[in-house]
Image (tube, grey):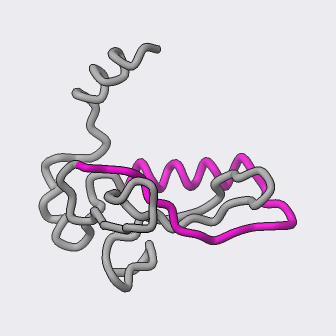
Amino acid sequence: MSLKRVCAILLFVRFDNISDREERKKMEPTAAITWVVEEFVKNCGACYCIGEYSCIDEMLFGFKGRCRMKLYIPSKPRKYGIKIMALTDAKTHYFLNGYIYSYKGSDGRTN
């Protein structure tokens, strides 16, 4: 699929219910994408068993749009983005589990 086609599809795709998004945003900053991230993590865990060596680390997903969770980390190649805490296999670099860091003290499950 071409990049132009993917961009056209992304203009029309919604992953959540827009009618109650504002209520959920008050409690959870990642309300618009929570379902997609949870399904991705669930599928990663179902398709792979972690090996002998694992690693817990932060990733910065480069993003320059408007977002409450956007962080500035000067030591990263892309300075602005969304921070993701991830459990990965150290040998294969396979993502097994993780969550979006939305604010200080967030652990992906509690507010």
The residue under the point 80% across, 56% down is 91
The number of discs equals 0
> Compared with residue 3, is residue 68 higher up or lower down, i.e. above or below?
below
Does residue 2 sit above or below 84 in this rendering? above
- Classify 22 as above or below 4: below
Give the residue furthest to the right: 52
Pick out the residue farthest to the bottom: 105
Pick the residue in front: 24 or 37. Answer: 37
Point out residue 4 in the picture as x, y percentages from the top left corner.
33, 16
Residue at 44% across, 67% down = 75
Quarter of the rendering occupied by the C terminus: bottom left
**Vertical placement of residue 89 versus 36, above or below:** below
Is 108 placed left or right of 20 in the picture? right
Task: Specify whether 95 is left or right of 69.
Answer: right
Q: Residue 6's spot in the image, x, y percent?
A: 37, 22
User: Closest to the observer: 92 or 98?
Assistant: 92
Residue 98 image point, x, y percent: 54, 64
Question: Which residue appears at 44% of the width and 72% of the height?
Answer: 108
Would residue 101 be counted in the magenta stretch? no
Q: Which residues are magenta?
A: 35-64
Front residue of 22 and 94: 94
Membership of 46 in magenta stretch: yes
- Image point (45%, 53%), residue name: 37
What x and y, as percent, mark residue 11?
Answer: 23, 28
Q: Quadrant of residue 20?
A: bottom left
